[in-house]
Image (spheres, rainbow, N blue to C red):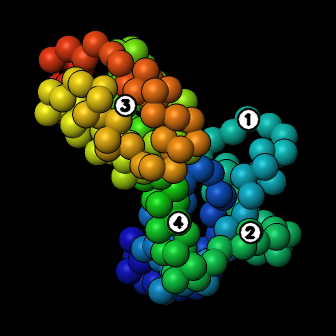
Amino acid sequence: MGSVMKSHFVSEVCMESTGIYWIPVWRLLENNFQLRLVNAQFFKQLPGRKSDVKDAEWIATVLLKEWARDNFVPDGNIQSIRQYGRRINEINKDLVRCQQHIDMILQRCNIRLSNYVSNMDSKSYRKMVDALIKAETSSYELVKLVHGRTIHRYSKSIIQDALEGDVKQSDRDLLL
């Protein structure tokens, strides 16, 4: 694409910022052309029927007459950092969703430890879930896995009552 444009002496490229569709084209052209990204709302205000050819003509006119204000597009390093940040947020959301799903399974089994622990990602919570997966059902044994601070805060009998439940094999399989 770039070589054909260069053969026609194109030095500037202007495109509208619709969703993420502009990003692949931007990446292909950014090293060889002066690029301008314009908000799509600017182009939607035009009267008349829309077509790709008319849009392209109007974008070229806007570029030549310097009517368009560029959107800010950060450099490649900043874009990469933003991608990593977005991915970390997605992974964190997935982790929270999985923890909530595990808790939902346990509550369905009448195990209500999440009412007493501050964090479902704590070591004692995970140890207790691992013990349940390995078919440990004794609340007396399960309470030994709960952190001492939690037991001291609420009492051993309350935590033990919260661990009394009926865990079926299907529940264990879903906890894996």
Q: Where is residue 127 in the image (x, y as percent from the top left)?
A: 29, 45
Q: Distance between the residues labelled 1 and 4?
A: 40 Å
> Is residue 18 shown left or right of residue 127?
right
Asked if labels 3 and 1 touch by Cβ distance under 8 angstroms, the answer is no
Q: Is residue 169 above or below residue 75?
A: above
Asked if labels 4 and 3 touch by Cβ distance under 8 angstroms, the answer is no
**Which residue is drawn at the image coordinates 63% and 78% (left, top)?**
74
The amino acid marked with disc number 4 is: Gly
The amino acid marked with disc number 1 is: Arg
- Pointer 1 residue: 49
- Pointer 3 residue: 102
Q: Earlier in the sequence, mark 1 or mark 4?
A: 1
The amino acid marked with disc number 3 is: Ile
- Pointer 2 residue: 71
Asked where in the image residue 28 lies, by quadrant, the reply is bottom left
**Which residue is drawn at the image coordinates 72% and 73% (left, top)?**
72
Q: Distance between the residues labelled 2 and 3?
A: 44 Å
Asked where in the image residue 47 lies, by quadrant, the reply is top right
* Along the line of sight, the residue nearer the viewer: 123 or 93: 123
Q: In terms of secondary structure, where does tag 3 sit?
A: helix
- Pointer 4 residue: 85
Q: Which of marks 2 and 3 is nearer the N terminus?
A: 2
Quadrant of the image containing the C terminus: top left
Task: Give the mark toward the camera: 3 or 4.
Answer: 3
Quadrant of the image containing the N terminus: bottom left
Q: Position of residue 166 (x, y in %)?
A: 28, 13
Q: Position of residue 174 (x, y in %)?
A: 23, 25
Task: Give the mark toward the camera: 1 or 2.
Answer: 2
| Residue 107 visible at all | yes
Q: Earlier in the sequence, mark 4 or mark 2?
A: 2
Q: In this view, does 134 lie above or below 27?
A: above
